Image (cartoon, rainbow, N blue to C red):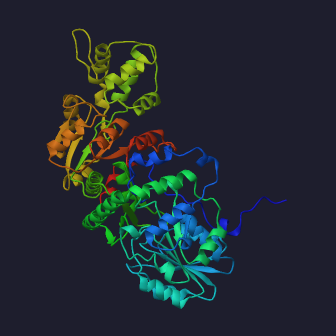
Amino acid sequence: MTDPQPAPGLARITAYQVPRSPTPVDLHLDGNEGLAPPASVFDGLAAQDPELLRRYPDARGLGRRIADRLGVPADHLLVTAGADDAMDRLCRAVLAPGRNMVVPEPTFSMIERFVLLAGGDFVSVPWPGATYPVDAVLAKVDDHTTCIAVVSPNNPTGAVATARDVRRLCEAVPQAVVLVDHAYVEFGGEDLTRLATELPNVVVLRTLSKAWGLAGLRVGFAVARPELIGWLQTAGHPFAVSGPSLVLAGGWLDQGDPSMEAFVAEVRRERPLLEQLLHRLGGRVAVSEGNFAFARFDDSLWVRDGLAGLGIGVRAFPGDPLLHDAVRITCPGNREEFERLTHALHTVLAPEAILFDMDGVLADVSRSYRQATLDTVLHYGREITAEDIAAEIALGDANNDWVLSRRLLAKRGVNVSLGEVTQTFEALYQGTADRPGKAGRPGLREQETLLVDPALLEGLRSRFRLGVVTGRPRADAERFLATHNITHFFDTVVCLGDAASKPDPAPVRLALEQLGVGCAWMLGDTPDDIRAARGAAVLPLGVTFQKDDPPHPNPVADALLTAGAARVLRQPGELKELIHE
């Protein structure tokens, strides 16, 4: 016996999955969702009888209301579970083995999946410019073509098609259905919806996910001649949209026009500003008519990851041969969020300064501060490991080594005052002076070495203001800089006592103020460093500057990414790779 095998179409594709940065984000500009409706949208649902949940839903009422809004006959419209559902239905209705769909690319990636799942052949045509490539499409059409895709505004490029383009396709290939994906039409481009009532072989797909902000409800619709609507009904589920979704969508359509129109207007205001900024920052920008901007960069993944480090998610396309260098950024449609986005883009692509934590970044403290912590705990009769220290640091709020040592002792049942722990720690770190009849002991501070090549600092100093933000007492910080002859590279040094301790962003903000800059990067080796930088809207870069390769998976790197680091650097020189001329 053989194992079960998938259908041929399924074997040729993978599940849809957006490749995201591992860094957490709170401003999602990677999915092109619209502005969230107010909480009052739920009021209509609360008034419903529970019978709504018991009975199978009937979408015809909502369909009639949408048809009235569009000015099309009710029998020309079918409500579906998002525009994706309508697209899937159409592919299954007109495609089969031996039939094909002609699709200009790059475009919405789900189209190819639906084509292959329906058993059809996917015929790709390049779409390099702002206008729909009608001639190239027609050149690819053959006797087996039963569908042609027109995504306008196109996702992810924002390019558009015109009514003339669609009419040419319909007249030249009357045996094929022309699929017009109009998910973004509210934001720009020519509205082609009514062509579905005028031409016999056009199906227009619309959605409430974008301009209306209802992606979570999964409500869309198709507009076409009744015969084609019948095909779509036959090819899909009879009760595709839930009763609560129908109620909520209908209620928001009744009251949400002013909000939707204001949101669309704000997106249209933001979009050219965002495109201009991306161009100034080195992007190769395509003019978009969607609710997003589209640009290509030499290192698009750095744009994605850098913005993620500032809490903003944007769409990149790693592994896609047509879009490997592309970034798509949703316009937030909100002035405060737009300002946050523009500041973040400046920070990632045009920083003015670079800040360094000291311990673990500039200074190798494995044989000084870390050893002092080990020896302090041992002084009170307990033993710990370097891994124990790293685990405690990963918990956060561990920027002060004296406090850290006391915490490790307390967890092992030793309760000692912070003053006593500090005295013990400092004797180990600073060393003891000679006393009559007794030789002094050198301090562990003598074991510290420089992690960063001065040549790297010199190169950075020629382009950026440099600063240090450390939890060390000032005397210890300045001694290390002077000992290793790197004091002159830094325009400011913020130390313990100058501001609240990390993870509070106050010391990072103080460094920005003293440097007179607004956009900066910061390198740190602890979650506290990362959270402090991110809280100050400074790009956080984690570092694990180790001579030996770290284990994989690396728990330290994972902790830094979880805290919000844009990237984790294993060697100081990797910083240069992120700085583009």
**Residue that appears at 71% across and 66% down:** 7
Residue 49 located left or right of residue 449: right
In this view, the residue in front, 399 or 544, is 399
Image location of residue 438, percent across then percent down: 26, 11
The answer to whether residue 526 is seen in the rendering is no
**Residue that appears at 26% across and 23% down:** 430
- Which image quadrant for residue 543? top left
Query: Relative to 124, is 547 above or below?
Result: above
- Which image quadrant for residue 265? bottom left
Image location of residue 424, percent across then percent down: 31, 16
In this view, the residue in front, 341 or 217, is 217
- Which image quadrant for residue 480? top left
Residue 339 located left or right of residue 546: left
- Figure disc tally: 0
In this view, the residue in front, 296 or 137, is 137
**Residue that sits furthest to the right in the current view:** 1
Please identify the quadrant where the C terminus is shown.
bottom left
